[in-house]
Image: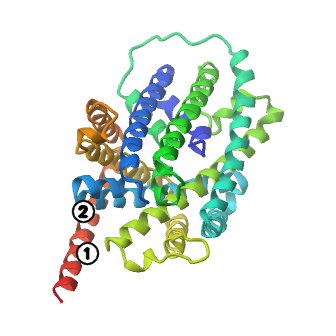
């Protein structure tokens, strides 16, 4: 959750929402909280790898579950490629694509080495990034210049900015995609998801409050968090951005491989992706395939297109999560039915607020997924009849 987004999302949000940027943050935080609560409720009852793909299949049927998995795989693979490109641009702009491909390859090897290794590396990175962000933003907040006066009413750009900020929050439900590899998932998953949300929402509020007064009168900077420190400390912020991006890249690759594992088990994807390594007990073929797909996107596609496809896919994925939660029996809920209803409406609203190119890409890819599902279903029926 504290990946590349926290270091970059403030600039487009400022361009779209201006002095109402913190309202966009509040909207995004509300959507993230609703999504996190609903995902927790689902994960407690269906502690399987695959996250909302498994929840959708369980409560809404094969096709709905497939669409969730399809949107997750495409959106997050695009996100992994985009993050690798952002990090590589900081490191060496002229060779960004090849460095990004190399980073994905290295982190794929880390994921293949086993979920405990992945978790250990993630903990180290997350700790450094959290401490670094606190060290950067707290002194800046204490010395904040005068806050801007709200001189106008909020406009539609506030909602679009909230959509962009939501993508920076994404990651709180990643534990749900690893459900089978979590010890005592009924106890661990809620603590991990809700705990992560509380920490990250607090950090975003702190950073936003410190940053907003410093953006007034400026065009959106490429590295907004550098405004919080003296020029001599700006390289430290850049280093934190690189480290945070690598941490989120690692988590995304792990979550992607577990979702493709579950889809392969149900023959929604080629069955070879469900092969489990005897040494690590992880889905090695899925892990390799995800890494290769992300490298291909890095080398062959445009970063802006990647961001648009990622955003649409992630929001539609969580919308399906809310739709699935509405089918849970009363005895399985600890939330009011109003929570997934509001969450579903807000997810759809944020999707509609995105640029037209993102919507077109999402609709087109949904059609491709539906065709793939129809072919896979036909092959399963044919194999069963034989």
In this rendering, is residue 99 above or below 17? below
The image shows residue 299 at horizontal and vertical percentages of 55, 68
Q: Is residue 363 visible?
A: no
Residue 139 position by quadrant? top right
The residue sitting at 66% across, 63% down in the picture is 103
Q: Residue furthest bottom?
A: 386
Instruction: Tell me how many marks there are.
Output: 2
Residue 10 position by quadrant? top right
Is 251 in front, or is 275?
275
Mark 1 neighbour class, 10 Å CA radius: few under 14, some 14 to 19, many 20 or more: some
The answer to whether the residue labelled 1 contacts the one labelled 2, judged by CB atoms less than 8 Å apart, is no
Real-space CA distance between mark 1 and mark 2, rounded to the nearest whole angstrom? 11 Å
In this rendering, is residue 234 above or below 45? above
Q: Is residue 153 visible?
A: yes
- Does 42 sit left or right of 345 as displayed? right
The image shows residue 265 at horizontal and vertical percentages of 37, 72
Is 336 in front, or is 103?
336
In this rendering, is residue 382 above or below 352? below
Q: Residue furthest right?
A: 232
State which tag comes first along the sequence, 1 or 2.
2
SS for dot 1: helix
Mark 2 neighbour class, 10 Å CA radius: few under 14, some 14 to 19, many 20 or more: some
Residue 62: assigned label: 2
Residue 53: assigned label: none
Residue 376: assigned label: 1
The image shows residue 5 at horizontal and vertical percentages of 56, 42
The residue sitting at 29% across, 54% down in the picture is 56
- Does 11 sit left or right of 365 as displayed? right
SS for dot 2: helix
The image shows residue 153 at horizontal and vertical percentages of 38, 15
Is 140 in front, or is 340?
340
């Amino acid at each position: 959750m504290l990946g590349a987004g926290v270091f970059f999302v403030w600039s487009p949000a400022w361009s779209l929402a201006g002095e109402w940027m913190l309202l966009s943050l509040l909207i995004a935080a509300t959507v993230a909280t609703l999504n996190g609560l609903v995902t927790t409720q689902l994960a407690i009852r269906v502690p399987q790898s695959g996250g909302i793909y498994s929840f959708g299949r369980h409560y809404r049927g094969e096709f709905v579950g497939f669409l969730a998995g399809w949107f997750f795989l495409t959106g997050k693979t695009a996100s992994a490629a985009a993050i690798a490109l952002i990090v590589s641009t900081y490191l060496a702009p002229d060779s960004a694509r090849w460095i990004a491909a190399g980073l994905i390859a290295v982190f794929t090897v880390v994921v293949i080495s086993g979920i405990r290794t992945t978790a250990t590396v993630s903990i180290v990175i997350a700790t450094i990034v959290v401490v670094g962000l606190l060290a950067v933003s707290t002194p800046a907040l204490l010395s904040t210049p005068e806050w801007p006066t709200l001189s106008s009413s909020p406009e539609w750009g506030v909602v679009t900015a909230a959509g962009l900020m939501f993508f920076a929050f994404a990651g709180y439900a990643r534990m749900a995609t690893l459900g089978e590899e979590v010890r005592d998932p009924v106890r661990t998953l809620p603590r991990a998801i809700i705990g992560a949300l509380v920490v990250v929402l607090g950090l975003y509020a702190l950073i936003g409050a410190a940053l907003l007064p410093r953006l007034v009168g400026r065009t959106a900077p490429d590295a907004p968090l550098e405004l919080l420190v003296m020029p001599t400390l700006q390289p430290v912020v850049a280093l934190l951005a690189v480290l945070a991006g690598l941490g989120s890249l690692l988590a995304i690759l792990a979550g992607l491989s577990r979702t493709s594992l579950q889809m392969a088990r149900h023959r929604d994807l080629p069955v070879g992706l469900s092969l489990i390594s005897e040494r690590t007990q992880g889905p090695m073929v899925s892990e390799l395939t995800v890494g290769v797909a992300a490298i291909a996107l890095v080398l062959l596609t445009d970063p802006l297109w990647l961001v648009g496809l990622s955003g649409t896919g992630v929001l539609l994925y969580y919308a399906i999560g809310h739709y699935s939660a509405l089918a849970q029996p009363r005895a399985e809920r600890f939330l009011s039915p109003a929570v997934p209803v509001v969450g579903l409406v807000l997810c759809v609203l944020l999707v509609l607020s995105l640029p037209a190119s993102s919507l077109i890409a999402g609709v087109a890819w949904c059609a491709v997924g539906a065709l793939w599902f129809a072919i896979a279903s036909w092959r399963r029926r044919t194999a069963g009849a034989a």
